[in-house]
Amino acid sequence: MKFPPQEILTAIEAADSFLVASHYNPDGDAIGSMAAMGFLLQALGKSYDLYNYSGLPERYSWLELPKSISTHIPDHNYEWVFLLDCGDLDRSGDNFMSSIARDKLINIDHHMGNPEFGGYNWVDPSCSAVGEMISLFARHFEVPLSKGLGQAIYLALITDTGSFSYSNTKPETLELAAEIIRNGLDPGEFTSKLQNQWTLNKAHLVGKALQGIELFHEDKIGVISATQKLMQETQTSQEDCEGLINLVRQIKGVQIAVSLRENGENTTKFSLRSWGDTNVRDVAVFFGGGGHLNASGGLIKAPLPEAKQVLVNTIAEVLSF
Ligand code: 5GP
Ligand code: MN
């Protein structure tokens, strides 16, 4: 069985004040593992704050949190600062690293290639989600995975395993989910809160984006795009574009799904997804991004049409399509 490093357990036991942070533009693993760490510290009687540069995304507003997530770093001399699910310091947010001393940083992550920038580092790419790693702290301190803590870890697992459908779903992942359900979580109730979040505008965005899907390289690369114009027409936001990529990967024969969205005048955010051994992390790293073997992302400093061309060409080159 996996076990958290002793020095991190000792740090939690010995200290009283903690800051818990995760990467900007947080997904369900980042938010879920932060919330779980907060619930755990609370159960241990510690004082703590939660920080995320982007704050809590609207789509997770239903989630029970141990306390609210601050979008500025509170002016406090924390003994330890947890940074969760963050494989790259650039993703911690604008002034995170100038405000936090590295030797106080505890880096807990599951991204391949995490450069271990903390004073203490626990990086384990074999864990499906950082939420799974936080559950091991809870097990050590004998805090039950019930109520808010169980829900937060469940959110992390569901997000990073695609509702237990990707190859990173291990027997341990399902055993952990089973433990949370045994402790009272209702999967149907949880899923309806997580998934039934669409506005009619989002449905219109999805419809138009689906119509615009393009296939390249013998239809092995599928691209879905969201321009600023499309978001304006459908009165939707950047956040509404989350999840578009999952629609492309369902097209028969598509080995690499790409989603692109205009993030500003001259910046395009890209996401990549694949199945099996097809490594899309290498492509993201080429553009200064990162992620996992089958799920990665990053930014390209170019307008969307240009970014699309260079990204499709690079995918074909890096993966020898
Ligand atoms: P998404 O495409 O859903 O934003 O992210 C998929 C995966 O790629 C996540 O594991 C995320 O952490 C990683 N990722 C996305 N964007 C970036 C980025 O700009 N830099 C790095 N290092 N990783 C990213
Ligand atoms: Mn994660």
Image (tube, helix red, strand yellow):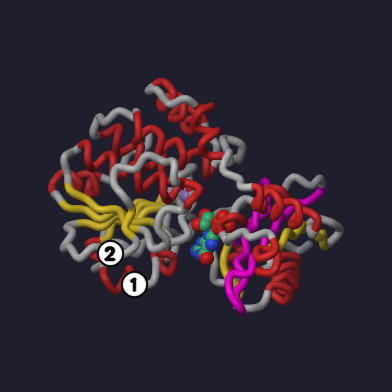
Q: Identify the residue position indicated by label 2 in the image.
A: 73
Residue shown at 75% from the left, 65% from the top? 316
Residue shown at 41% from the left, 27% from the top? 180
**What is the x, y in percent for residue 144?**
30, 28
Q: Identify the residue position indicated by label 1 in the image.
A: 95
Horizontal arrangement in the rendering, residue 133 relative to residue 313 (left or right): left
- Which of 114 and 189 lies nearest the eye of the viewer? 189
Range of magenta residues: 253-281
Q: Is the N terminus in the top left, top right, bottom left or bottom right quadrant? A: top left
**What is the x, y in percent for residue 287?**
59, 72
Q: Contact, CB < 8 Å: mark 2 with mark 1?
A: yes
Q: In this rendering, does residue 291 appear at all?
A: no
- Which of 236 and 314 lies nearest the eye of the viewer? 236
Q: How many marks?
A: 2
Q: Secondary structure at mark 1?
A: loop
Q: Amino acid at mark 2?
A: Ile
Horizontal arrangement in the rendering, residue 230 relative to residue 155 (left or right): right
Residue shown at 20% from the left, 65% from the top? 75
**What is the x, y in percent for residue 127?**
46, 43
Q: Amino acid at mark 1?
A: Asn
Q: Where on the picture, by quarter, is residue 147?
A: top left
